[in-house]
Image (cartoon, rainbow, N blue to C red):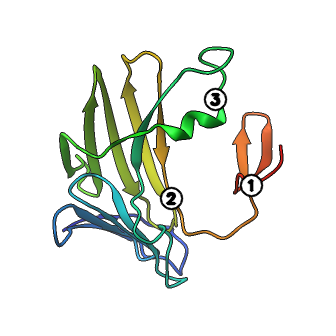
Amino acid sequence: PHQAVVEDVPAAATSEVALAPRVGGGHVLDNGLLRVEIDARGLVVSAYDIDADRETIAPGRAANLLQIHPDFPNMWDAWDVDEFYRNTVTDLVDADEVVPGEDGVSVRIVRSFGASRVTQVLSLAPGERRLGIDTEVDWHETEKFLKLAFPLDVHAERYASETQFGHFYRPTHTNTSW
């Protein structure tokens, strides 16, 4: 396994990030706070919070799942996302490559679809409970939009979305009357 060492991290955290092979294919990133398992398809099949002793990915699901939806809104092409977009989806589960990153402590994933290509680098930083996802998209599709799905095992009524002007709250469910 490869390791990166960083100084000046919180005492509760480790100062190292390890990358190791995963049983069954893929890779495991571990920084002592979060252990992330990435399968041979480049999907996150586990994101385990070590301090909380809790899996954060929904049971039986995989995260970092790129999805293509048709983009035929009722109005305002390229701006409007109507609720019915969820009725049709193509999961992009095939990867051209899933390999250790150049730094030895990240995972590089490349996917091709249609005339487009997505390159991702998944990484953990020492002392953080956050998976970093650096995504570069070379987009050549029309009337489609790309979404990254992360089915989390989180129980909450709302979540905060950040914008350049601050943040706002959204419900975590769609069973409202509006």
Q: Amino acid at mark 1?
A: Asn
The residue mark sitting in front, 3 or 2, is 3
- Circle 1 SS class: loop
Q: Residues within 10 Å of mark 1 (few under 14, many from 20)?
A: few
Q: Is residue 88 left or right of residue 174?
A: left
Instruction: Identify the residue shown where x is 60% and y is 35%.
Output: 84
| Residue with the mark numbered 1 | 175
The mark that comes first in sequence, 3 or 2, is 3
The mark that comes first in sequence, 1 or 2, is 2
Distance between mark 3 and mark 1 Cα atoms: 17 Å
Distance between mark 3 and mark 2 Cα atoms: 20 Å
| Residue with the mark numbered 3 | 81
The residue mark sitting in front, 3 or 1, is 1
The residue mark sitting in front, 1 or 2, is 1
Residue 106 image position (x, y, % from top left): 30, 54
Instruction: Identify the residue shown where x is 47% and y is 37%.
Output: 88
Instruction: Identify the residue shown where x is 51% and y is 65%.
Output: 128
Q: Is residue 104 left or right of residue 170?
A: left
Q: Is residue 77 left or right of residue 160?
A: left
- Circle 3 SS class: loop
Residue 113, compared with residue 10, is above or below; it is above
The mark that comes first in sequence, 3 or 1, is 3
Q: Residues within 10 Å of mark 3 (few under 14, many from 20)?
A: some
Residue 146, compared with residue 4, is above or below; it is above
| Residue with the mark numbered 2 | 151
Residue 157 image position (x, y, % from top left): 76, 63
Residue 9 image position (x, y, % from top left): 51, 69
Residue 46 image position (x, y, % from top left): 38, 69
Residue 40, compared with residue 22, is above or below; it is above
Distance between mark 1 and mark 2 Cα atoms: 17 Å
Given residues 92 and 23, the one toward you in this image is 92
